[in-house]
Amino acid sequence: MAPTKTKTCRKRSGKEVSFDFKLSVIDEISNGLISLNYASKKYNISRSTIDYWMKKLSNYTSQKKSVSKNDEIRKLKEKIEELESIKDFQQDIIVEFEKVTGNELSKKYLPECLANEIARKKKKLSK
């Protein structure tokens, strides 16, 4: 048997970069902070490589940012409850202010529907 000659593997000329670095470059481009050309020059990476990253990692970023409909509905309901409680608190403050000062500023400066709500609160509190 003749000794076999081992072939040497061709070395890669590209540099290894981390996954986080790829995501940060794509994020900068997608947010409009830098252009694709500028990113290519800044990081010394070809535009075709960045395009490749964008195609491959676009699914990852969209999955990462996507939220299920049920979670989104739950968050929106919580936000509505929070805003309604803030509105009620503000209306209570307006009612107390109008009692103390005697001026009915809500009718003058607020939309009609809010002024009517404040008037109903006044009636409930006066009973």
Image (cartoon, grey):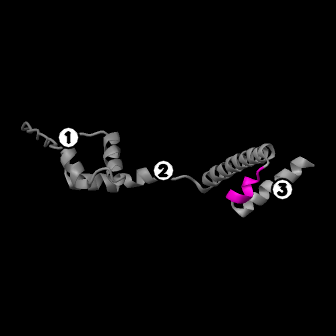
In percent of the image, x 74 and y 62: which residue is there? 113
Using a 10 Å C-alpha cutoff, classify the residue at mark 2 as few (fewer than 14 neighbours), some (14 to 19) or many (20 or more): few
Cα distance in 3D space between marks 3 and 2? 43 Å
Which dot, 3 or 2, sits closer to the camera? 3
Q: Position of residue 124 (x, y in %)?
A: 88, 51
| Residue in front for this viewpoint, 92 or 35 | 92
In percent of the image, x 68 and y 52: which residue is there? 80
User: What numbered label is drawn on residue 65?
Assistant: 2
Q: Is residue 98 above or below residue 108?
A: above
Q: Is residue 40 left or right of residue 122?
A: left
| Residue hosting label 3 | 120
- The span picked out in magenta is 103-110
Q: Are the two marked residues, 1 and 3, in contact with CB atoms closer than 8 angstroms?
A: no
| Residue in front for this viewpoint, 125 or 40 | 125
User: Is disc 3 placed on a helix, strand or loop?
Assistant: helix
Q: Residue furthest top?
A: 3
